[in-house]
Image (spheres, rainbow, N blue to C red):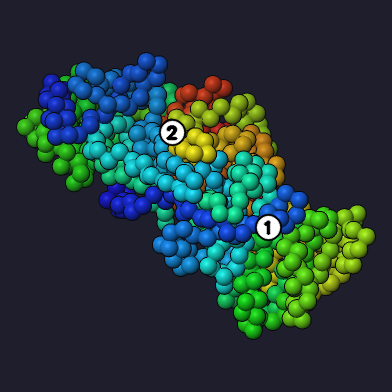
Amino acid sequence: MTRILFSDKLDQCVAKWRSAGITVIGPVQGESLSTYAAVEKASDFAFGIVLPDRSLKELFFPQTEPMLRYTIKKNEIETTDFAPPAAPRIIFGARPCDASGLAIDDPLFGWDYKDEYWFKRRNESVIVTIACTESDDFCMCTSLKHSPDSTKGSDVLLRPLDKNRGWVVEELTDRGREAFALISEEIKESDETALPTAEVPEKFNLDTCVTWLQNPVNFDSKFWKEISMRCIGCASCTYLCPTCHCFDIQDEGDTYSGIRRKNWDSCSFALFTMHTSGHNPRATQSARWRQRIMHKFNYFPGKFSVNSCSGCGRCSRQCPVDMGITETLQEISKL
Amino acid sequence: MTETIQNAQQNIYKPAIMKIVARHDEAPGVKTMRLEFQDPADHEQFKKTFRTGMFGLYGVYGEGESTFCVASPETRNEYIECTFRQSGRVTSALANADVGDLVTFRGPYGNRFPIEQFHGKNLLFISGGIALPPTRSVIWSCLDQREKFGKVTIVYGARTVADLVYKHELDEWQERPDVDLVLTVDPGGESPDWKYRIGFVPTVLEEAAPSPDNCIAVICGPPIMIKFTLISLKKLGFDEKNVYTTLENRMKCGVGKCGRCNVGSVYVCKEGPVFTAEEVSRMPAADL
């Protein structure tokens, strides 16, 4: 026997969670891009989307976020914190690659100095992931040793039944069990079986690539220039990436009052590393693309024992010049 | 990972408020500011944490924050001194601030020069131009407990006489019998009354030929000076493990999150800014 949440009960679940003061968030089709956003009723969800265009990271690490408000009067500076919103949330229908992305970034936001903007949201969010039964040409989770039903970063894993009738429920954490205790009446015991997960073919051999990246000789390989020749440095890949975490800090205001903000930034931009003196350690686009690949598959795992990539494939899917991580690692595995 | 998340305690991006209590023009465009903490709790935290070599983010609200070293020594932690060249938005705002004005400081961050390990050893400080401030923090940290160290030699050069910073302190070191100061300016940078050396730092260093025996070298300067000084130190017989330097990369957070100070796998803000020459030699040169 398995525990099933049938789709026709979802409206009641959303209503129960909402009346318990929980914001319910899920995949929705926005005006242009699909994304994860708040829903009010079951019909707001867009479960048919293989993967929302925008990643789940922005619900934890928004594109721009106020951190401090400053007011300066004569000889006094008043600084007020912008506490991150700490309202409980259920993200219903996260994809496994997006949920993994959050878990991948936890150690980064938490080593020594804890970034409360990230962790307050993490602590207030229940991640209910739906295993993938469909994939597209860009999905590459299996190449990254993740899977269409990976549980990393999830509190509950749901496996779809056929004909969109509902999901088999697997509660993974106490946080997940607590959230589902609120909808226990909507969950039925049944002997239904879930659909098989999507078949995502392996696109490259990760171990081969990592070995190549770890060899110091290849840092200066001409491969980097060749592969990144067509990169226009637009940063779409880093912005849509569920694990890219680089940011800038900027003040918005004047000498008397204003707001200090944390904004997404990208290693694709020339100004990212430019010194005041004009010296730029990563002066070329190839040096910047090398940094991105090295950081994800060599440096980051060296620090945190996990690759900074969950295989969502957005970098390739949305790249205007068709060069993402997949294309790069495929080429590396041929070297 | 979810289970191990700890509750956040405070806003790590909130700076301390500092009052400018003194300012001094060092060289054209270069100023030193002495800053005092306004909140005693911030000051206590600083006194507990600060060791020579650490850096901070100095800021002016409305303009932003800029990363530079703490130029004052750990032995004088009642205040913070910073020396900077006016070149961008933040440094211009700082340069325009006057005694009594309030600015901000976030830090101290990063690692330090392990000066207890230098006890009983001879010290050789080599510095060029605007890179004297980080070296100066170490110099005074050692001179303030002079008996713990052997011979102290300082080699300092700048492009022109006007570009030398801490001129009043250079005079003081010049007069101290327990400090050997070798001053130089680049050829053409001398003034009619210049009575010290003329030549580039690496050349002058080789002429001064300090012994590598039981000696720690601390070098800080523009990349080109570092490159050639390391060659000279090698010629003089210094082991890369006994040569320390400090990297100054662009930073925004200072605490290992914003991603821009990486050199190869190294997060300069957390694993640095202080490295031995041996550690630097293992970093990809093209990324420096």
Query: Mark number for residue B222?
Result: none
Of B204 and A45, nearer the camera is B204
Residue at 9 percent of width and 35 percent of height: A184
Mark 1, secondary structure of its residue? strand
Quadrant containing the C terminus of chain A is top right
Q: Position of residue B71 (x, y in %)?
A: 62, 61
Label 2: few (<14), some or many (≥20) within 10 Å? Answer: some
Chain containing mark 1: B
Q: Amino acid at mark 1?
A: His
Q: Residue furthest front?
A: A74
Q: Are marks 2 and 1 on the same chain?
A: no
Q: For residue B42, what is the image quadrant?
A: bottom left
Residue carrying label 1: B24
Q: Position of residue B46 (x, y in %)?
A: 48, 63
Q: Nearer the viewer, mark 2 or mark 1?
A: 1
Label 1: few (<14), some or many (≥20) within 10 Å? Answer: few
- Rounded to the nearest whole Å, what is the CA distance between mark 2 and mark 1? 38 Å
Residue carrying label 2: A64
Of A151 and A190, nearer the camera is A151
Residue A303 visible in the picture: no
Mark 2, secondary structure of its residue? strand
Residue at 20 percent of width and 44 percent of height: A175
Residue at 46 percent of width and 63 percent of height: B43
Labelled pair 2, 1 in contact (Cβ < 8 Å): no
Quadrant containing the N terminus of chain A is top left
Chain containing mark 2: A
Using residue A269 as the reference point, say whether residue A72 is left or right of it: left
Q: Position of residue B247 (x, y in %)?
A: 63, 55
Using residue A271 as the reference point, say whether residue A77 is left or right of it: left
Of A164 and B283, nearer the camera is B283
Q: For residue A193, what is the image quadrant?
A: top left
